[in-house]
Amino acid sequence: MDLRHLTARALRRASLAAGGITPLDKAANIVDSRVVWRDGFTSWLTMANAGMMDPGNLHCFNHAVERLPAGAPVVEIGAFCGLSTNLLGHFKRLHGKRNRLISVDPWMFEGAPEAAGMLGQGPVSFGEYRDHVMDSYRRNVRLFSKDDLPAAVELTSDAFFAAWDRGETVTDLWGQALKLGGGLSMVFVDGNHSYPFARRDVDNAARNLVVGGWLFLDDSGDGSGWEVTRVVDELRRDPRFRHVMANPNHLFEKVA
């Protein structure tokens, strides 16, 4: 698609954005049995900010963020170039939520070789790729979330939750000190998709979520092929959680 067509599509989506959110912007759209959120900001953002995001996630983000049970932080596991970070920040903005958003990512990519390995037959090493992705995260988040800059912690999720349980203070990507510990109001799980990692992420989230908090698993839609779907099946039988929706990825509320 050339620049002219991209621009025309963006303008159609964002034609009312300058005047704020209107009923037309805010209306849900049904696409392939999924509810898809669209507004001017998300239309422009998703064109410029690299990331792998099912459009249905936006409706789940909106549902959960609007109903955050407390002022406790929101944690996203897996940030890549900052698309989900900026989208979560956008829904916080829409609903007037001041909960601290914390991105957790070691920026080490699932299935990638060591840093010296190359991207296929190209001239770029995975070390260079990692540097580029982290720089993209910084630039994207500094621009699109500049009114409420999230914390960004360069740790694996296992290391992060261990530090959280110990109440440690860590330094984030912006050089800010961040005191860890306490309850969480929402956890978005989008890290390593293999079963042992996804299961530990959910267990760590469940232990720290307050009652009424939200647990959302990316790439968990039925038939996705990722092992995280096994965790969804287990959560459906877990009395601590209520299954809220699949759009197509699964959103749960902690009830006990």
Image (cartoon, rainbow, N blue to C red):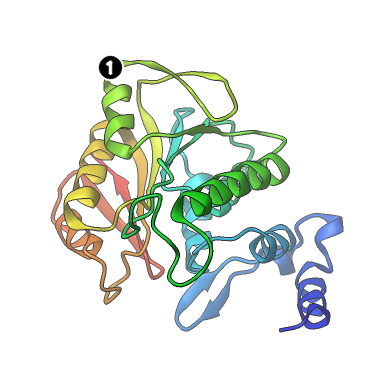
Left or right: residue 19 compared with residue 115:
right
Towards the viewer: 58 or 126: 126
Instruction: Please say whether residue 153 is visible from this viewpoint.
Output: yes
What is the quadrant of the N terminus in the image? bottom right
Q: Quadrant of residue 225?
A: bottom left
Tag 1: residue type?
Arg
Residue 227 in which image quadrant:
bottom left
From where the camera sits, is residue 80 visible?
no
Residue at 33% x, 57% y: name it. Answer: 113
Indicate left or right for 238 with 67 as reference: left
Tag 1, which secondary structure?
A: helix
The image quadrant where one finds the C terminus is top left
What residue do we see at 28% from left, 17% from top? Answer: 166
Location of residue 183 with respect to 36 vertically, above or below:
above
Percent of width and height locating residue 69: 43, 36
Callout count: 1
Left or right: 200 as drawn, with respect to 93: left
**Percent x, y for residue 104?**
42, 38
Residue at 31% over, 34% down:
209
Q: On screen, 168 above or below 203?
A: above
Tell me residue 248's x, y (percent).
38, 70
Residue 235 in the image: x percent, y percent? 19, 54
* 85 with respect to 43 (left or right): left
Q: Nearer the viewer, residue 117 or 112?
A: 117
Q: Badge 1: how crowded within 10 Å, few (<14), some, or many (20+)?
A: few
Residue labelled with disc 1 = 166
Which residue occupies 40% across, 51% down? 116
Give the answer, above or below, for where 153 lies relative to 165. Answer: below
